[in-house]
Amino acid sequence: MKAAVLRGANDIRIEEIADPVLEPDGIIIRVRACGICGSDLHIYKQSGREGTIFGHEFSGDVVQVGSQVTDLAIGERVSAIGFRPCGKCFWCSQGKTHRCSELALVGYQLPGAMAEYVSIPSARAGRNVFKLPDNLSYEVAATIEPLSIALFSVRKAQPKDTDTAVVFGAGIIGLNSIQVLRSMGVSKILASGRRTARLQAAKICGASLAIESDSEVIKTIMEATSGLGTDLAIECAGVQETFDQAIEVVRGGGRIMLVGIFEKPLTWDPLKVISKNISLVGCLGGNFPGAIDLLQKGLVDTSPLISHTFSLDKAQEAFQVQLRNPEAIKVIIKP
């Protein structure tokens, strides 16, 4: 089969590799659409991960079913989370394989969905393989994974409809967080980010004010909240600047949800967090069923966020567009 294989920093090549082998407890999916994630870009820009086949945001059709799988059938349209636990660590012994200390993930340690086919080593319907409603296209279904992260993180914040929220970072997870906040009744939502296209998308998603991150973000947010600051900050950018801004603009007793993946360690003053009694909450998780439900009911629409689509043969160009094109929001590869 064809696959997009990382061969060096900023270097993806299309190669013929062996088809995935069906495991007794797994399935094989014919990939129809796969999104490029920000975490893919982190690795793409570096050397040392040669041989990686990216792709953990995807959808497709089940084409093979393992002998031990009883709740999935050939021909079903699905999205999935692919992983292989070690089976030996503390978490595996507790039956919580998703917390495995040595978890191997599809798209990172295991070959991902930027290929014609992808293997899900351990497949269970409703646990890590999710059947798609007929009204969801393959392209939209490839955005379920980032939407699920936004949903998990925003729900963890337990926002009230009277809250004022700010979202830092207008990538796909930040934009989805705006939509999830809106679906939960939060009406005053501010957003800060880069790129004109993404700020425009933030307004479409429900932000009442979209702020260019190079401007006076703190001053603008404080003016927009009559000097009180926000009750809630969703930090999706994963950089020092936005972390510091979140601490400055969240009012006393507020919450900061740490969602973005930080490439570098932070330098910060805990006294500011202590003096304002701020809660810093780490977020790592997803909610696929909830995300599918939001899409099916029309409470969230990710289709306007899909800015570019490419064939598998043009995966290198797709990554460059996601990385550098100011108009790019979510780039989809269609094998």
Image (tube, rainbow, N blue to C red):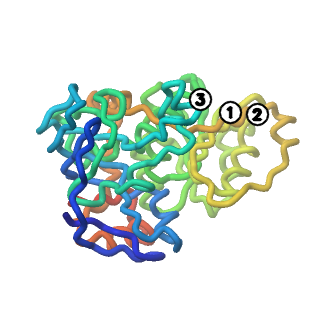
Kindly tell me whether residue 257 is visible in this rendering: yes
Q: Quarter of the image containing the C terminus?
A: bottom left
On the image, the x and y values in percent for residue 233 come to 63, 39
> Which residue is located at x 74 percent, y 39 percent?
227
Question: In this rendering, is residue 20 above or below 97?
Answer: below
Asked if the residues shown at circle 2 and circle 1 are in contact, with their CB atoms under 8 angstroms apart, the answer is yes
Residue placed under numbered mark 2 in the picture: 278
| CA gap, disc 2 and disc 1 | 6 Å
Residue that extends furthest to the left in the rendered view of this protein:
75
What secondary structure is marked by label 1?
strand
Tag shown at residue 127: none
Disc with the residue nearer the chain's start (3 vs 2): 3
Residue placed under numbered mark 1 in the picture: 255
Give the amino acid type for the residue marked by disc 2 in the picture: Ile
Residue that extends furthest to the front in the rendered view of this protein:
88
Q: Foreground: 258 or 210?
A: 258
> Which residue is located at x 41 percent, y 64 percent?
52
